Amino acid sequence: MSYNIALDGPAGAGKSTIAKRVASELKFIYVDTGAMYRAMALYMLNENVDLSDTKAIAEKCKSAEIEIRYTDGVQCVFLNGENVNDKIRTPRVSDAASKTSVVKEVRVILVKLQQELAAKTDVVMDGRDIGSKVLPNAQLKIYMTASSRVRAERRYKELTEKGEKCELDQIEAEIKERDERDMNREESPLVQAEDAILLDTSDMTIDEVVEKIISLKETN
Ligand code: DC
């Protein structure tokens, strides 16, 4: 049986950085489920679908072919045969993903893909509903969070390092808006699963968080 680590939490909590490191140390596969929702959102944007029209999204998502492949351990998301890794990290796609991921039909398609991956391999999977919905039987569940200011500072650093111009206050406001939407939607809202371990990373270094998760796995 495969070993599954579910890592949930709000935007900017550091999930992907941590999940990648933990996966690499444990020789597990890292599954970034947010990237799948982002690829789906990109598809809706490309197809000019009105993002306030849930019926249109529910219909259109059936024709999106989303696939995950690994090249040298790096997850690549393919949308209708094209590697879209470089196109899904923009603020426009972040916003669209938060809107399109509320649609049940979108979630049904992507959750199935996520469950198939986890059934056949040891994974560290990050997202919003992994411990509560996608992998309810995961052997280890972590709910990772940090204050909205700390999360905004991390995103700000990431974006400015890439040469993008941005405002810290605006990033924090966007993060709060996404939290609000992710936590209050009807379909699979972001919640801490009952059996998940809470990790507040506001005052922790990346190394400390990675070590903590690995020690939790060892003692689990
Ligand atoms: O983790 P991220 O920022 O790349 O996620 C992008 C959006 O996708 C986010 O607004 C919430 C949504 N998402 C989700 O609903 N369920 C998941 N398992 C992962 C992401």
Image (tube, rainbow, N blue to C red):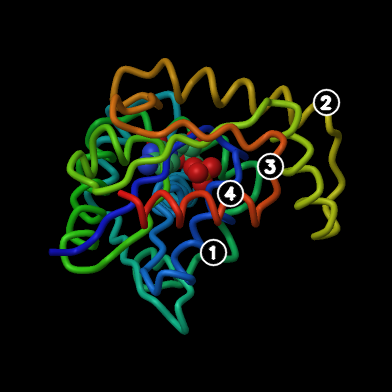
Residue at the image point whose x is 24% and y is 48% from the top: 139
Q: Which residue is mark 1?
A: 21
Q: CA separation, marks 3 and 2?
A: 22 Å
As rendered, which of 94 and 112 lies closer to the eye? Answer: 112
As rendered, which of 130 and 96 lies closer to the eye? Answer: 130
Q: Secondary structure at mark 3?
A: loop
Label 1 CA crowd tier, 10 Å (few <14, some 14–19, many 20+): many
Q: Which residue is mark 4?
A: 209
Mark nearer the N terminus (4 vs 1): 1
Residue 117 placement, left or right of 66: left
Mark nearer the N terminus (3 vs 1): 1
Mark nearer the N terminus (2 vs 4): 2
Q: CA separation, marks 4 and 1?
A: 10 Å
> Depth-wise, is mark 4 or mark 1 nearer the camera?
4
Q: Are marks 4 and 3 in contact (CB under 8 Å)?
A: yes
Q: Are marks 3 and 2 in contact (CB under 8 Å)?
A: no
Does 39 sit above or below residue 107? below
Residue at the image point whose x is 31% and y is 66% from the top: 67
Name which residue type carries label 1: Arg
Residue at the image point whose x is 63% and y is 37% from the top: 201
Q: Which residue is mark 2?
A: 169
As rendered, which of 150 and 27 lies closer to the eye? Answer: 27
Q: Secondary structure at mark 2?
A: helix
Name which residue type carries label 2: Asp
As rendered, which of 139 and 81 lies closer to the eye? Answer: 139
Mark nearer the N terminus (4 vs 3): 3
Residue at the image point whose x is 34% and y is 67% from the top: 68
Q: Quadrant of ligand 1?
A: top left
Q: Secondary structure at mark 4?
A: helix
Residue 197 placement, left or right of 108: right
Does 116 sit above or below residue 72? above
The residue at label 3 has a CB less than 8 Å from ligand 1: no
